[in-house]
Image (cartoon, helix red, strand yellow):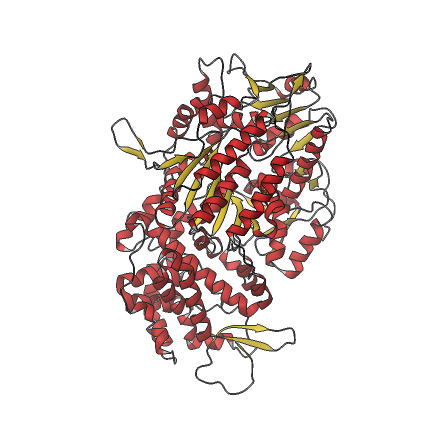
Amino acid sequence: MRNFLNTSEHSTDYLAHVLQAKDDQWREHLLEEHLREVADLAAKFAAHFGGEQWANAAGIWHDLGKYRKVFQSYIKKASGYDPEAHIEQGLGRVDHSTAGAIYACQQLKGAGQFLAYLIAGHHAGLPDWDKAEAGGAALSHRLKKGRDKGYLEETLTAFIPPDILKPDSTKSPLSKPLGGEDGLHLWLRILFSCLTDADFLDTERFMAPEKAISRQAEWSMSGLKKQFDTFIAKKISGSTRTDVNIVRENVLNDCRQSALEMPGIFTLTVPTGGGKTLSGMAFALEHAVKHGKTRIIVAIPYTSIIEQTAEQYREIFGDAVLEHHSNLDPDDIEKETARSRLAAENWDAPIIVTTNVQLLESLFAARTSRCRKLHNIVNSVILLDEAQLLPPDFLQPILDVLRLLTEHYGVSLVLSTATQPALGSQKDSFGTTRLRGLDAKREIITDVDALFERMRRTEVIRPLDLSIRRDWASLAKELEAYPCVLVIVNSRRDAYELFSLMPPGTVHLSALMCGEHRSAVITEIKKRLKAGIAVRVVSTQLVEAGVDLDFPVVYRALAGLDSIAQAAGRCNREGNLERDGKLVKGKVVVFVPPRSPAKGLLLYGEQATRSVWHGQESDLLSHRLYERYFNQYFSQENPDKHQIMPLLTQASRYGMVQFRSAAQRFSLIPDSGVSVLVPFGKEGFKLMDQLRYMGPERWLMRKLQRLTVNIYENDFKALRKLGAIEELQPDIWGVCVTNAYDQQLGLLTADVLNKSQPDSCVF
């Protein structure tokens, strides 16, 4: 890189990027330098799975099209340099990726077609090969168009160093794709990650060198393990030797012992309250140190509980923990900017706390910002918390990709839950394989039966007739008899309706509250419980995993057996409940709510529970019921209902993969909606203002994660129509009226907000 000199150009002064510095001088990033740096870095990333030749070739050719005269003229246009010129999408932008893709095909034939996906997609994302829906964005169409327009011929008129056109990495036979035809899509996606992260990082080194320096912190797994061991030793020495704490120590010891086994797939089956959060980390650290794993990824089902888990780990590991869940990066590639590209996460930390959705959707993603981090999953330990929550209609693609990771990419997988799902291979009544499962699993706990028996701390009471529904008013009246009670319902709407009928002082919890708000409320609930102050809480299922509440009485709306078991884990959690000086069991009451869930997973769960409870008078949460429950639950859906695997594997032997279409179909949350920033707390509006005027800086986006609420598309449109939210940055939305966010209920939907006149805009 060099400063701009207003002199005649040399023939080799081809530019990759330009930047206007604070002194108004233009700085140049030379193209040759950029290509070499990206190639070297991409190869370094891919060396972890033997793909360095491929990654080097992709890196050296990814911006070959920037040698085109039309691009160089554009970046040096008379009105001044364009710092966004390297972003392809948008009006008037120049295609600089297709030429390299064509060149790869020309040089390497069939192997070049694999590289063409990576090179052509390094801005727009991995393309489909030829799906009709992709139109002109399909790779086959782009290659034809580029050939017809002579993109490569124009590129090759430039002076390009011979070792860029013929790099050493292409002079010897290339390694075979990992996983064969069925694994090609994942192999290409991880190679794509190596390329895009290398491209982002080298661009960042030029555009924001201070940020590049800040990434250079290093951690060792052995050092993190020492910190953890010190923390645990102190925690054990300072805790009372109760039955529950002794059980937790036994679980911890089992985890440490099993971690010494060879890498692969493990199950960690522990009752709620048995210490999975810390014991699972003990396994991961011990296993990582023993087998040289580079990263630990903790995937949690709900965004709403990530904050507590991440905070617990940060208390031990400090800045070594990266919390990543919200998708505040633009979904629309037309709105992508240089800054938004650099702000995308690449998981460059040793301990990642994320959501199942973020992890799994990234493994099927096409967008660069979602794929960037994937190479950092290689050689990691993945703790998949609450594994029973994997969606039945996506089960086949999920299990296929998890198996590929463990077989070819050095990943060890831990399926952690109190209610272990039936994830082995299954055949139908004709003997045909219905599900390709995870069959080579090893249980971490020595004696699961004995563990569950020892951790029995509650009595579950169910209605004799599960067909009779309760109304909210009678339930609210019944709950008044309990000064300290937790009620868990199935939806935000149910929580709002019941809460509105409860006595003053009742606490509301739902995902309409941002993470910062939920954390504050949960902290207050814990304080009151610890101090023996009565508190009634109405919550959605967000408290059912990872939230360490301990109530004497819990009411749970009829749901899946696993959800009821999780709710029971918030009752008499520590086993210390006393009456008349004697230890007693907590009380878990299952009730049938006023309406059944809409058709879908909640309804399937409720139906499966009704089935396994038929004729079951006692031991309603026996872990022996779970296999029968999950077999029925999963059997209600086609495990590849959305036909994702055919898009990825059906024609892969011919190099034809439909990446974009598969990514669009792999959406784990139907109508997953829109993330909206909310002005909670003293910092809320200030941080939103900073986003408005500074743009999506990486440090700022991390802070803003805790101020997001995800709402359905129809709620988003209604709030926009009211003028309650506005666009702060491309595709990033925020609340802009003062009364749209309530301190008890969180973000108010339009029907609630319509009852009063919105205040004027605060921005």
Taking 691 as reference, is 609 above or below it?
above
Left or right of residue 31, residue 727 in this image: right
Picture quadrant where residue 360 is located:
top left
Picture quadrant where residue 5 is located:
bottom right
Q: Point out residue 398 in the picture as x, y percentages from the top left corner.
A: 40, 41
Left or right of residue 475, residue 122 in this image: left
Left or right of residue 13, residue 309 in this image: right
Q: Point out residue 84 in the picture as x, y percentages from the top left corner.
A: 53, 68
Picture quadrant where residue 170 is located:
bottom left
Residue shown at the point (55%, 19%) measured from the top left: 592
Number of numbered markers: 0
Residue shown at the point (66%, 28%) measured from the top left: 537
Residue 186 appears in the figure: yes
Taking 210 as reference, is 418 above or below it?
above
Q: Point out residue 407 in the picture as x, y percentages from the top left corner.
A: 35, 46
Q: Point out residue 437 in the picture as x, y percentages from the top left corner.
A: 35, 36
* Residue at the far bottom in the pictured view: 8
Residue shown at the point (38%, 78%) measured from the top left: 160
Residue 122 appears in the figure: no
Taking 419 as reference, is 141 above or below it?
below
Question: In the image shown, does 297 or 617 lie closer to the viewer?
Answer: 297
Question: In the image shown, does 675 or 739 lie closer to the viewer?
Answer: 675
